[in-house]
């Protein structure tokens, strides 16, 4: 359902999300995300989310995701790149974090383009 890792040399958080989630999976994702990133200041990190294998999520999960982004806005990474292969998944992400769709967050159709954008903003 998901994989989370951190590359301290960049520093960059990587999250790969796959499939259809329920609220329990989202809760596990949030816990693992917090555990993985607890020793790294958000303003010094970037994030790459690979959502190429994600499917359109339920309203309940997207609402939990929107609440998470809203409640943690001040501690989110300084830049987030999201790689998507589905227009519908992109639209869901757009609605989840509308205030971040600016210089802080961008969408890409390839990991290479996402990495380049994150590196340019470092």
Image: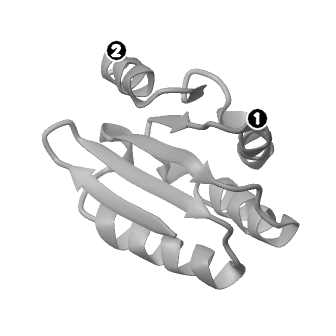
Label 1: few (<14), some (14–19) or many (≥20) C-alpha neighbours in 10 Å: few
The reply to whether residue 5 is visible in this rendering is: yes
- Residue drawn at (31%, 50%) of the image: 41
> Residue reaching furthest left?
9
Is 36 drawn above or below residue 48 in the view shown? below
Q: Regarding mark 1 in the picture, which secondary structure is present there?
A: helix
Q: Quadrant of the C terminus?
A: top left
Q: Position of residue 45 (x, y in %)?
A: 32, 41
Q: Is residue 14 left or right of residue 80?
A: left
Label 2: few (<14), some (14–19) or many (≥20) C-alpha neighbours in 10 Å: few
* Picture quadrant where residue 98 is located: top right
Q: Nearer the viewer, residue 122 or 88?
A: 88
Q: Position of residue 64 (x, y in %)?
A: 73, 68
Q: Is residue 35 left or right of residue 104?
A: left
> Residue reaching furthest top?
120
Q: Nearer the viewer, residue 100 or 23?
A: 23
- Residue drawn at (43%, 20%) of the image: 113
Q: Regarding mark 2 in the picture, which secondary structure is present there?
A: helix
Is 98 drawn above or below residue 54 in the view shown? above
Q: Is residue 36 left or right of residue 83?
A: left
The reply to whether residue 73 is visible in this rendering is: no
Q: How far apart in space, not on screen, are marks 2 and 1 (Cα)?
A: 25 Å
* Picture quadrant where residue 87 is located: top right
Q: Identify the residue position indicated by label 2 in the image.
A: 120
Q: Position of residue 37 (x, y in %)?
A: 32, 61
Task: Return the mark for residue 97.
Answer: none
Q: Position of residue 103 (x, y in %)?
A: 56, 21
Please tell me which of labels 2 and 1 falls first in the chain. 1
Q: Identify the residue position indicated by label 1 in the image.
A: 87
């Amino acid at each position: 359902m998901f994989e989370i890792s951190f590359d301290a040399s960049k520093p960059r958080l990587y999250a790969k999300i796959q499939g259809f989630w329920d609220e329990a999976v989202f809760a596990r994702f949030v816990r693992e995300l917090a555990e993985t990133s607890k020793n790294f200041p958000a303003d010094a990190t970037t994030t790459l989310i690979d959502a190429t294998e994600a499917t359109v999520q339920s309203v309940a999960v997207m609402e939990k995701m929107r609440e998470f982004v809203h409640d943690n806005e001040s501690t989110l990474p300084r830049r987030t790149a999201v790689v998507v292969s589905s227009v519908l998944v992109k639209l869901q992400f757009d609605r989840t974090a509308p205030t971040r769709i600016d210089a802080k967050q961008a969408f890409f159709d390839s990991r290479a383009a996402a990495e380049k954008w994150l590196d340019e903003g470092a």
